[in-house]
Amino acid sequence: MRGWTRDFFVALAAISLATPALAEDGPVRIGAVLSLSGPAAVFGIPERDAIQAVVAHFDSTTKAGRKFEISYYDDKSNPTDAVRAVTQVASADKVVAIIGPSTGSGILAAGPVAQRLTIPLIGPAGTLAITDPKNEFYPWIFRAAPSDASDVGAILQDIAKNKVTKLGIFYQEDAYGKTGVDLAREVGPKLGVEIVETASSPYTATDLTAQATKLRNAGAQAVFLQVSIAALGSSFVKAARQVGLDVPTYANAGLAQRSFAENVGPELNGLRVLSIGNLPYDPTPGEAELAKMLEAAGKKPQGWGELTGVNALMAALGAIDAQKGKEITGQSMRDTLETLCDFEKYSRGKVCYSAKDHDGWHEDSLVVTEVHDKQLRTIK
Amino acid sequence: MLTFAEYLLRGTLAGAVYALLAAPMSMLFATVRTIDFAIGGYALAAAAVAASIDGPQGLVLALATAAACAGLMALIFVALKRFGCDDGIVYALASFGLATAIASVVLWSWGAKSFVRDSNAVFWSIGGIRVAQQGLFNLGVATAVVVALHLVLQHTSLGRMMRASAVNAVGASLAAVPVQAIQTGVYIVGGLLGGLAGLLVLYSAGLDFSAPLGLTLSGFGAAILFGIGSPVRCLFGGIAMGIAQAMASGYFSEAVSAMTPFLFIMVVLSVGRSGAEALAGGRP
């Protein structure tokens, strides 16, 4: 191929990838790159289910009457696959915004791709680093869930309020677990809570009695679980009971799942779990509306995965409606998202994005719940 | 001292499950000279079924499901042999594929929920250390299974035929040993034992769709530690791994404790006489 011909086609391909402009009457295309397999599927599947339920309820039409289409891809809970999926959904489906990837590591890996293709990612993950302004790709990432800093701050405040001064932490061996511990070490002393011991485990541990023994021996007055795998959380509370670690237990939002609540015994009534809303058990009117949509789609609300997935969808739809009558591109979606404030959604709290705040969701969207009779009850 | 003894005991109890996962690997290696990496998948399948169906019939169906999954692996093994494949590595890789397929089927059928059953909250005190009855039950089951497998392998004509099938399949066939039937049967029995391990995990800790790889690697580590050819060594390997994990979790910082069990395996395999046997199969 002659040089100029190759250059022409390369330029054509780059333009078609980078600026998928849409005529006003055509459907706006949105990508959803979610963890539908692998360890993070515990969040990715509810995110997808909820997005599908809302899309069905809206009949693929925004409030302002604009048609939209969603293309779903699996990031397999893996950053490499997340990059591949983001590239694919951008090139094959010509999307103007992408919901996901589901995990923080996936978003961090896909960020440079989003920047290059000028398509914003709306990530339903708490990982602090994804909206770090130092990232070169910062302008292209928006968060659709409270950050880990908001989560850890909120649960530690509750722990401090209950006069706990010596805290033990059990966490899973991944970025979520480690970040939570690091934040707790930073925030805890400011609230008068000393982290006396920490213990960790990989996802698939079959026995956690050694970890529970370590925390018991350290004299912890309470235990904080920085865990998102329900089976691991259940396993730890069993192990704690076995070794005689009879102290109050608190869990971060990762365990606000039906699967966890239903698997802890009655002796753990009172175990406190931070949650993003309380979709399955104590919904607000907005959450109840979303729960109804899920039930209409044949799905049982599982936890907060549905809320964060729909948060991302509603942000995208809000940005589309805010551009009524205009040509929509990845760039225009990004610019609009950055000015989006108080748009229609189903979760709690006031959400405003700005050039300086790509987090949007903050502590006012969180609630502290307690396990009672295998349900998570919101503390009033 | 009591703390050290507590970690020792807790590690021993934890290692029982690893031993139960390792024992079928050892049995298969002694018979087919390959590894069934789908053991963790059989455990997951059994746990998923038992978590969904209450009562003894749930347990029976769970074991039947695990055996059926292993039967599928046996069919894959037979098909590969028919196609002229006689390489243990290929069978092992096929079993990895099956484990992934089982995890996908569980994810598709049950979603991402975790499988946990509450065992009797009965605790015993051993020298002032509180342990759950379930942990002691796990150790008892693992010991019984390992001893039974050892007796079958080393002291019965079936065991001799199994070992002959591995050493020289053609020669064994000429000596009227039903090699293929034995090897298929060993796969299925291995599946049953994997299912049993899954049930013990279900009642003692719990698991979800992502468990197969971790369970398989734990079992494999226990199997190779002191020599894969003997189920009894698998028991000791499992217990040693459990103790290494418990000690690492109890005494080291998390940065070190995560890698300690693997370092322990590496050191044992590198410097121990048993390491050479492990690689050679460790036959008596």
Image: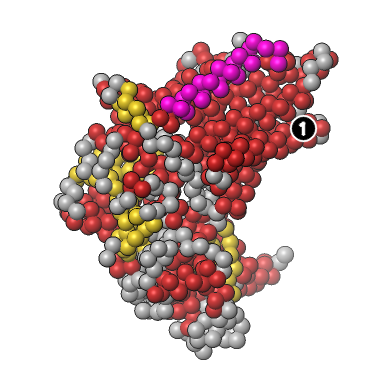
Between A332 and B265, the residue placed more toward the observer is: B265
Residue A318: percent from left, percent from top: 45, 79
Residue B84: percent from left, percent from top: 81, 31
Q: Magenta segment, principal secondary structure?
A: helix
Residue found at x 51% / y 24%: B142
Residue A323 appears in the picture as rendered: yes
Q: Is residue B89 magenta?
A: no
What is the span of residues highlighted in magenta in the rendered image? B136-158
Quadrant housing residue A223 = top left
Residue found at x 60% / y 19%: B149
User: What colour scheme governs how the chains and residues are painted in the rendered image of this protein?
Assistant: secondary structure
Residue A272: percent from left, percent from top: 30, 54
On the picture, is A194 further left or further right than A353? left
On the picture, is A123 further left or further right than B130? right
Q: How many numbered marks have been drawn onto this rendered protein structure?
A: 1
Between A370 and A28, the residue placed more toward the observer is: A370
Q: Which residue is mark 1?
A: B78
Mark 1 is surrounded, within 10 Å at the Cα level, by few (under 14), some (14 to 19) or many (20 or more) other residues, namely some
